[in-house]
Amino acid sequence: MSNNGAAIAAPNLPDAGAIALAGISKSFPGQGGETLAVLDNISLSVRSHSIVALLGASGCGKSTLLNIIAGLVRPDRGEVSFGGIGSARFKAWRSISYMFQEDRLLPWRTTLANVEFSLEAGDMPRAERHTRARDALKLVGLDGFEDAFPHQLSGGMRSRVALARSLVTEPATLLMDEPFSKLDAQTRAQMHGELLRIHELKHMTIVFVTHDVEEAVILADEVVVLAPRPGRIREIAPIDCARPRDPTDATAIQAIQHLRALI
């Protein structure tokens, strides 16, 4: 990685950002002892370096599907593969990063130390951790705030720290579970711009969960619309508008109306 924060290189893996889901189904035990089907026979291919939104009403299984991709939840049936390698044999899990809905910053740690946290599981020298964390903070526009604590930051700045922490491991794939849903409209729009700028630099694969139709249209190359429980793919809608996208543009409005009619 360069010290000017211009880029964080993806791991040298063969098409590690290409994700394939084949026949994914998942159920959970219900409160009364019954079985609750959450996902039913989900098959999906995500192109490397693309941005894909998982869209649908609350409870349709979007976050469960994201957690299955991340390896946090095992499906009852079906398989997830990365670059043609099934998840059971996939070894490069550090090439996949997850940004949660809450920023989950540790309040007793500085901004720099929060970003470094993602690097502490291995044997990376401390000096290199510092350098990479500073580069990641610069990438998201937070150089100069390395010594600030989370309570000293605005909501948008905390989201940038969480994004830097997700990027510092140099992922080929970034998974995001409604990461901007708690931000006000103006800050959320700023974060959309930041994410697209970083994606343009990094060329990583991004899969994100949202229930915001406008957010899906602004960010995604494709929108995967899930039907209500059990979650099934209702439609995979390509978004062909040029970026940056204005949600008041006629083409974007048409896409928004179409997606709203599907949910």
Image (cartoon, helix red, strand yellow):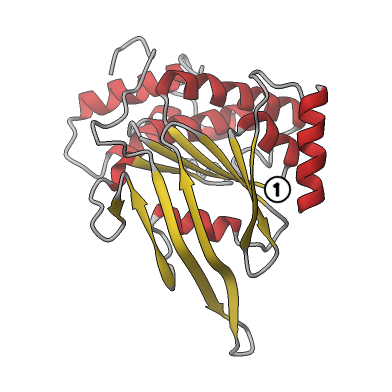
Callout 1 secondary element: loop
- Asked if residue 59 can be seen in this view, the reply is yes
**Neighbour class for label 1 at 10 Å: few (<14), some, many (≥20)?**
some
Percent x, y of residue 235: 66, 51
Q: Which part of the image, by quadrant, shows the N terminus?
A: top left
Q: Which residue is located at x 67 percent, y 63 percent?
A: 59
Rendered position, 177 above or below 109: below
Closer to the camera in the image, 136 or 58: 58
Query: Can residue 154 be seen in this snapshot?
Result: no
The residue at the point 50 percent across, 53 percent down is: 66
Number of marks in picture = 1
Q: In this view, does 157 lie above or below 235?
A: above
Is residue 95 shown left or right of residue 180? left
Whether 175 is drawn above or below 201: the answer is: below
Query: How far across and down, in percent of the image, does residue 252 sit?
Result: 76, 28
* Residue in the image at 35% along x and 9% along y: 4
Residue at x-position 56% and y-position 43%: 208
Q: Is residue 143 left or right of residue 52?
A: left
- Residue 39 image-quadrant placement: bottom right
Residue, far bottom = 33
Vertical arrangement, residue 87 with respect to residue 101, above or below? below
181 left or right of 176 in image: right
Can you identify the residue that label 1 sits on?
211
Image position, residue 152 (x, y; %): 58, 28
Q: What residue type is labelled 1?
A: His
Q: Position of residue 203 (x, y in %)?
A: 42, 25
**Front-most of 254 and 62?**
254
In the image, 38: left or right of 87? right
